Image (tube, helix red, strand yellow):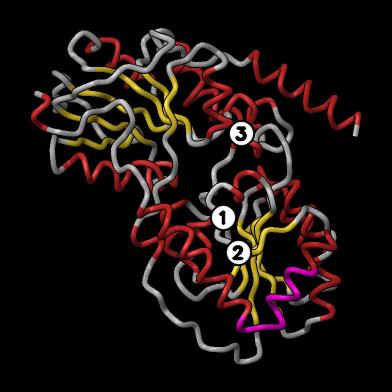
Amino acid sequence: MMLNELKSKLHLKLAQVVPKGKTKEKTPATFKPRSIIVFRKNANPTFAYYLEDRLTYYSRRIPVIVRCIDHDNLDDIDPAGAFVIICRYLRAKHVNWLNQNQSDLCGIGMLVDDDIPAVITGVEATFPYRFSLVRWHVAPMVRLRGKLDIIWASTPPLAARLAADNQAVRLLPPLPRREDIGEVLVRPPSDGGITMGYYATGIHIKEHAFLASFIPELLAQYPHVTFEVAADRRVRHLWERLAATTPQIRFASVVPWTQFSQRTDYGRLDIALVPLLAGLVNDARADTKRMDVCRQGAAAVFSNVTAYERNRHQDELLVENTPQSWRLAIETLINSDTTREKARLATRAALVKLRSEADFTIPGLVASAEAW
């Protein structure tokens, strides 16, 4: 325990060294833009889960322009009175555009849904991914230091970390889309075969290792259960070794977000596994995996951590991060169609409640066209 605490403290110190964006003021202000401009990197879950439906709300009142930083041009954008939202990443040419047009803009804000300095200084992320974070996030933020008006953070822990650095921070929680929630469809009883799965990249290497510690033994006890895992190179070899003696393990390819959101459509999985182990990065995460689970129409086992306690429905399965607790919860779902259906509907109910109580505005941005 003492060693883990020492590692956590060292990780925190290293993360604090990474250069960050800096807002002009310590206290968030309110802005009344004539239009909203969003810079995003391709289709991605941050945009989908935090901005997509909120921007639809704004688009009924003021013009909303969404540009992909990978290929869209900037020549036809009118900066006059616009508020620019940076969705995690930015290219050098967009930083140049912001600097050139700063005097005409209403303001500049950035949305973050990860503790990016912690990801960069942690051990889970691959070097290419860390480099991409430095290139697309850290470097632009250094150039925009002192020019941001607001930073939106996805969770209270992340907001607290950013605010501790004297930033103007507002909370922007996830907002499930209608297509993530879907209709109330009754899944037919199992025909004898059950598929459970875990989809996560190598940044969740600890979670992959955790599941690998007991999944093969569990599958040996339940020959009618198949386990599908999406794993990149860093963790795929781990599962390949296990698959050599456990034929019920099969692989799903790691694909871009658009394909992933289409693949996780209704009915692919019966049981979704959603572990999240303690750590500086994970402790600041949101519960967006709920949306993936609901879109799949699956019953889920979640880790009993702050991220999933936040919007928990009483009938969801949240368990402590021990192999014994997880195995017991999974077996409960395997052995009962009724329990699976109850857990599946509970996750949907959690998202319905979250959406019904959500604020569709973006904190700090006045939505009414009457503002101008």
Q: Would you say 168 lies left or right of 215 here? A: left
Amino acid under disc 2:
Glu
Helix, strand or loop status at disc 2: loop
**Would you name the residue on which mark 1 appears?**
312
Q: Which residues are magenta?
A: 328-338
Query: Is 187 located above or below residue 264 in the figure?
Result: below
Residue 39 spot, x, y in % from top left: 32, 31
Earlier along the polypeptide chain: callout 2 or callout 3?
3
Cα–Cα span, label 1 and label 3: 35 Å
Determine the image quadrant of residue 130: top right
Task: Please say if the residues under marks 2 and 1 sit with CB atoms less than 8 Å apart.
Answer: yes
Residue 362 spot, x, y in % from top left: 31, 34
**Would you name the residue on which mark 3 appears?**
128
Residue at the (72%, 36%) spot, across then down = 279
Neighbour tally class for label 2: few under 14, some 14-19, many 20 plus, Cα within 10 Å:
many
Mark 1 or 3, closer to the camera: 1
Residue at the (45%, 58%) spot, across then down = 351
Cα–Cα span, label 2 and label 1: 7 Å
The outermost residue toward the right is 2
Determine the image quadrant of residue 104: top left
Earlier along the polypeptide chain: callout 1 or callout 3?
3
Q: The C terminus is located in which quarter?
A: top left
Query: Is 216 located above or below residue 69 in the figure?
Result: below
**Would you name the residue on which mark 2 appears?**
316
Amino acid under disc 3:
Pro
